[in-house]
Amino acid sequence: MFTGIVEELGSVVAIEHGEQSARLVLRGPLVASDATHGASIAVNGVCLTVVDHDPTTFSVDVMLETLRRSALGQLAPGDPVNLERAVRSDGRFAGHVVQGHVDGVGEVVRREPGDRWEVVTVRLPPELAAYVVEKGSIAVDGVSLTVSALDGAAGTFSVSLIPTTLALTTLGRRAVGEVVNLEVDVLAKYVERLLAARTDTLRKVEAP
């Protein structure tokens, strides 16, 4: 589990493509410093498993399903990536519950600079719209953010990025038209599941 608080802005060193997978070699001295084989690291919000490492880099395998359902398939050597190690049980929980299981890919459609911040608007897949609420949490490229506005007609949501987020994550350089990984609040999905189960039970009880 993660919190969406990016620890380090790393970079892609190399990509080895296979028929059904890819191996990414990533530079991130902070997260690699205590990496172990099998450790979990979120890369742009995708939970991946360390298969090799040295003091400054680590390698992860990415299956075809993950490449298809996330923006990781569009990475190239030199690209920056958001990195976060799995949260420790005794650590400070500063963001929100992030599983590292990307729900879909969104597209940056607008950037509006302010005096010290920037409002970024993202178009999200229609099937995720019900899980996104104003003032609720969402992970964008693994960054825990608060939804500042929703436009149901346009199918978009907006987030306000402070200078630290702009400088220390990939979101500071995502251009209009680029894609980002999205993970909605898992609590919303659990609530939906529980309500659906309750409704199904009531229907069975009321059935003649």
Image (tube, helix red, strand yellow):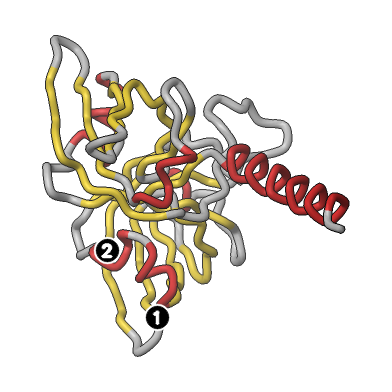
Q: Position of residue 167 (x, y in %)?
A: 24, 29
Q: Position of residue 116 (x, y in %)?
A: 19, 12
The alpha-carbon separation of the residues under discs 1 and 2 comes to 17 Å
Q: Residue 104 occupies which quadrant of the picture?
A: bottom left
* Neighbourhood count class around disc 1 (C-alpha, 10 Å): few under 14, some 14–19, many 20 upward: some
> Could you tell me which secondary element the residue under label 1 belongs to?
strand
Identify the residue at image location x=45%, y=68%: 60
Q: Residue at point 44% right, 74% down?
A: 65
Q: Amino acid at mark 2?
A: Val
Question: Can residue 29 be seen in the rendering of this structure?
Answer: no
Q: Which residue is mark 2?
A: 13
Residue 193 as seen in the image, left or right of residue 143? right
**Foreground residue, 35 or 128?**
128
Q: Secondary structure at mark 2?
A: strand
Residue that label 1 marks = 21
Residue under the point 44% across and 20% down: 135
Residue 153, percent from left and from top:
25, 36
* Residue 12 appears in the picture as rendered: yes
Give me the residue at 28% from left, 23% from top. 161
